Image (cartoon, rainbow, N blue to C red):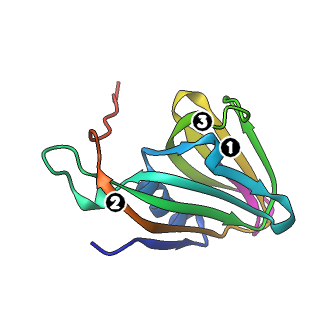
Amino acid sequence: MTDLKLLALDSEDLDIVSAHVQDAVVRVGDMGFAKADRRFVMLINRYAWEAGGTRGRGERRRAGLHFDFVETAQAEGFDLNAKDGVLELLAVRFISGTEPGGEVLLTFAGGGTVRLEVECLEARLRDLGGVWAAKAQPRHDLD
């Protein structure tokens, strides 16, 4: 399977990126805001939904997700000092503001969020090469 490379320049593009990073796990220490570069970066272990499952397990892939033109970044609902803490990413959304800017909202299981105020939306997702069998396929209660 070819490594995934996606670019999001609008909310529809970001919906596609969000689908590919749903159920990704990330260490708190593997994400950060480079204020001088106006970039927010996350190294994630994404569940490769597009790969299909092998006996219900599937695979995980190491990937980088970054957002450019970030003016501010705010985290809530988890401890930023717990660098080894692990979060499960549920969704990434764009909320339009003063065009072309707005807010990117990264939502994590358990209620944690990261809010990025962006001048304009530009996000990139890229697989970095590491692939391994997942311990289990993520499941969600729909009730």
Circle nearer the N terminus (1, 3): 3
Q: Amino acid at mark 3?
A: Asp
- What residue lies at 58% left-to-right and 41% top-to-bottom? 107
Secondary structure of residue under mark 3: loop
Q: Is residue 84 left or right of residue 37?
A: left
Which quadrant does the C terminus fall into?
top left
Residue 44 position (above or below residue 114):
below
| Callouts 1 and 3 close, C-beta under 8 Å | no
Distance from Cα at disc 3 to Cα at disc 2: 21 Å
Query: Among all residues in the image, which is located at the extreme right?
Result: 36
Disc 3 + disc 2, Cβ < 8 Å: no
Query: SS of the residue at dot 2?
Result: strand
Give the image location of residue 116, x and y in percent: 73, 52
Residue nearest the viewer, comparing 135 with 21 = 135
Closest to the camera, between mark 1 and mark 3, is 3
Q: Along the horizontal axis of the image, is 18 left or right of 143?
A: right
Query: Identity of the amino acid at label 1?
Result: Val
* Residue at mark 2: 131
Q: Callout 2, which amino acid?
A: Val
Q: Residue 3 in the image: x percent, y percent? A: 38, 72
Residue 4 highlighted magenta (yes or no): no
- Asked if residue 102 lies in the magenta stretch, the reply is yes
**Disc marking residue 114:** 1
Q: How far is the residue under mark 1 from the one under mark 3?
A: 17 Å
Point out the stretch of residues depicted in magenta.
96-105
Q: Judge the density around disc 1: few (<14), some (14-19), many (≥20) Cα neighbours within 10 Å.
A: some
Q: Is residue 77 above or below residue 9?
A: above
The secondary element bearing badge 1 is classed as strand
